Image (spheres, rainbow, N blue to C red):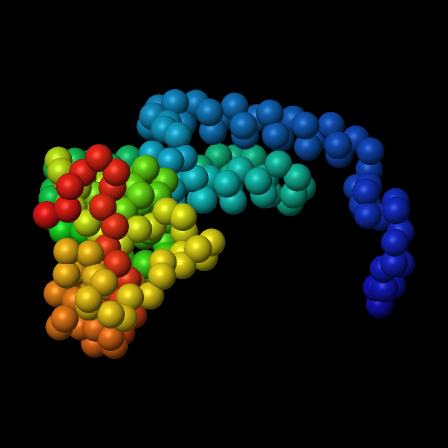
Amino acid sequence: MDQPPIPFDLARMFLGDAPPLFFLEILFRTLMIYGYTIVLIRWIGGRGVAQLSMVELLLVIALGSAVGDVTFYPDVPLLHAMLVITIVVLINKGLDWLILHYDTAKRTIDGVPVAIVGDGRLLRDGMERRNIGAAEVISSLRQNGVRNLGEVEHAFMEGDGVLSVFRFDDPRPGLPIVPPAEVRRPAALTDPAVAPEGKACCLGCGTLEEAVAVLPDGLCPECGCCEWTAPVTLPGHKAE
């Protein structure tokens, strides 16, 4: 019967039970697999992590497992690991070929763009399709330099998860997203008499409505929110 491990046994924790010469084998295994993987990555063409497609991301994950195990597990032969790595790369090349030649394969594997913002408001249907929340969309818009939803004519969530933003030539009044609502929430608007240009802006999705039709607590026809604020126009642009 195996003896239970001794807690905080430094020799076991740092060195294990392998003979000292096995550390030299780990070095050899690591250099061998690392060099072989570099050759294959050069063959398929590498890109930055932010540019990876779904197929390439899966390739990175699969290679990470295959490369990592063989470097220090003595019972994993080098040739077995190299065969696995080669098969994974060949599968990746096959999927690339399908994506290049067949639109159906591209849509299935890489996904399709989905409209997330349109005419200055968040599009709930698109957000639900991509399983993304309003806070995440608004955060991505801020990272694209957007201060107000009224700036955005269209925003699409691409197949690789990147948000493509297209601005109006002349921004409209809209929901301010700078500073973030978590830092300073826009003031609630309840009186139609003080609504700028007679408009109210939904705090949930940015929809603009006639203030007299929705205040003080009417529901937004797009998202069902009952909270409204005054739409904001960017400095240097006139409200419509």
Q: Is residue 111 left or right of residue 19?
A: left
Residue at 82% from the left image edge and 33% from the top image edge: 20
Examine the rendering and report whether any part of residue 58 can be seen.
Answer: yes
Work out whether 85 lies above or below 200.
Answer: above
x and y percentages locating residue 90 in the rendered image = 33, 36
Q: Residue furthest front?
A: 193
Examine the rendering and report whether any part of residue 127 can be seen.
Answer: no
x and y percentages locating residue 233 in the rendered image = 22, 46
Nearer the observer, 112 or 5: 112
Residue at 33% from the left image edge and 34% from the top image edge: 51
Say how many tags the image has.
0
Q: Quarter-wise, where is residue 128 in the image?
A: bottom left
Q: Is residue 37 left or right of residue 155?
A: right
Residue at 31% from the left image edge and 43% from the top image edge: 147
Q: Is residue 183 left or right of residue 240?
A: right
Work out whether 231 lies above or below 56.
Answer: below
Nearer the observer, 148 or 44: 148
Q: Quarter-wise, where is residue 212 in the image?
A: bottom left
x and y percentages locating residue 32 in the rendered image = 57, 26
x and y percentages locating residue 111 in the rendered image = 22, 50
Nearer the observer, 121 or 6: 121
Which corner quadrant holds the N terminus? Answer: bottom right
Nearer the observer, 140 or 17: 140
Residue at 23% from the left image edge and 55% from the top image edge: 231
